[in-house]
Image: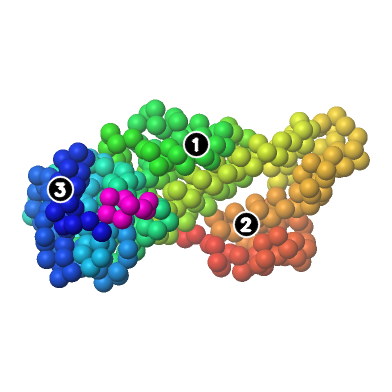
Amino acid sequence: MKKLEEIEYFCKLLFESVGVPIYYYNMYQEEVFKFTANIKPYPLEEKPLHILEILLNERPFSTIASSPFAENYFYLKCGDDAILLGPTIEKTITHEMVNGIMNDFNIPFYKKQELLHYLQSVPIMIKERLQQVGSLIHYFLFSQKLETGNTEAFKSIEKPDVLISKAKQEMSFHYSYLYEKKLLQFIKDGNLKGLEQSIAFQPQNGRFGTLSKKSMIRSEKNLIIAAITLATRAALEGGVPSEEAYTISDLYIQKLEEINDMNDIIQLRNNAILDFTERVAKYKIHSYSKPILLCQRYIQKHLYEDISIGKLAELVKLNASYVSQLFKKEAGITLKDYIIRSRVEEAQKLLALTDYTITEIYSLLNFYDQSYFSKVFKKYSGLTPKQYREEHLISELD
């Protein structure tokens, strides 16, 4: 462990180099020294001491902490003492975003200018870079690398004024046109490694998109719906069948409307983008022959019609027996089972999204017999149609 004078000198150099506010506290939570930028006074709570108290109660070794106002902090234990880096913020905060924050957390209107001035005075730095700065201090203190897995992500606290959350704001489709194009290309190519690297090293210039001036949460949801729509198109271009892509898109958007925690909203966005990319990669690995692709696409487009193996054989101009054998060989499932499974997946969508009766659904999808429909539905979904609807039905939102 270094001497206090050495630590102070190193922190001073680091602050002058990267501009991150640095606080050093002793075991009694007394401020020993600090290096701060020209940050305006925080209008809602005395900071960063209250944040430090929360982190000390949890007693992590190192922590990345985020507030619902998009502030990020890095906390590091130094024996009985502690170093706190931050606040930093990932993007420029606009008037519209502040309005949304105030509505979401019931902040008095007279605090608006103070809150805006404070947030706009916070240094801009993405979370990954803040963690790198914290890792540099750790290496200086202990002559050891700080592995990413050793840094805990701090969980949410209910009280908004002292909320520290794991708000992962790694990506947005509204940062810049070039960045957006790059991400969409990664999805289209099924390039998981490239996508993850782009998320980790997102551009720092630009602003958060704002699609709702009344609520920050509503605005974030609207942005994510737009992102999912773009990702869906990229996945389609990458080879994911249209029914699969649109179904996945619908399910993510429905789930999005059910949640109101910012951490969960951000996580859902990241899961959706990665899911689409993984599906593209899967279809690129499982490269089907042209006849099998034609059969799959025809089946997905004609689920509400009678589909026979003879009709599919006629479509691809091959013998029916040969088509069946080729399909089983390439897809790992018989043509009959593929048709049934696809209709069950469509039935799941209708059960969750519409008010059609179960009788209407199995009739529309050419099952004809309710007993048989219930049997195959349970085989592929693990639930009866009634149970599935009870668990997945999405009510119409206001």
Queried whether the magenta region covers residue 163, the answer comes back as no
Boundaries of the magenta span: 139-146
Is the residue marked by circle 1 packed among few (<14), some (14-19), or many (20+) residues within 10 Å? some
Q: Is residue 140 left or right of residue 23?
A: right
Question: Residue at coordinates 78% horizontally, 63% vertically from top-left?
Answer: 372
Question: Residue at coordinates 66% horizontally, 67% vertically from top-left?
Answer: 383
Q: Amino acid at mark 1?
A: Gly
Q: Amino acid at mark 3?
A: Tyr
Q: Quadrant of the N terminus?
A: bottom left
Please name the residue that numbered disc 1 is placed on.
194
Q: Secondary structure at mark 3?
A: helix
Q: Is residue 164 left or right of residue 383?
A: left
Pick the residue in front: 199 or 262. Answer: 199
Precedes in sequence: disc 2 or disc 3: 3
Please name the residue that numbered disc 2 is placed on.
348
From this view, report whether residue 12 is shown above or below residue 263: above
Precedes in sequence: disc 1 or disc 3: 3
Q: What colouring method underlies this structural image?
A: rainbow
Q: Disc 2 vs disc 1: Cβ atoms closer than 8 Å?
A: no
Precedes in sequence: disc 2 or disc 1: 1
Separation (CA) of disc 2 from disc 1: 33 Å
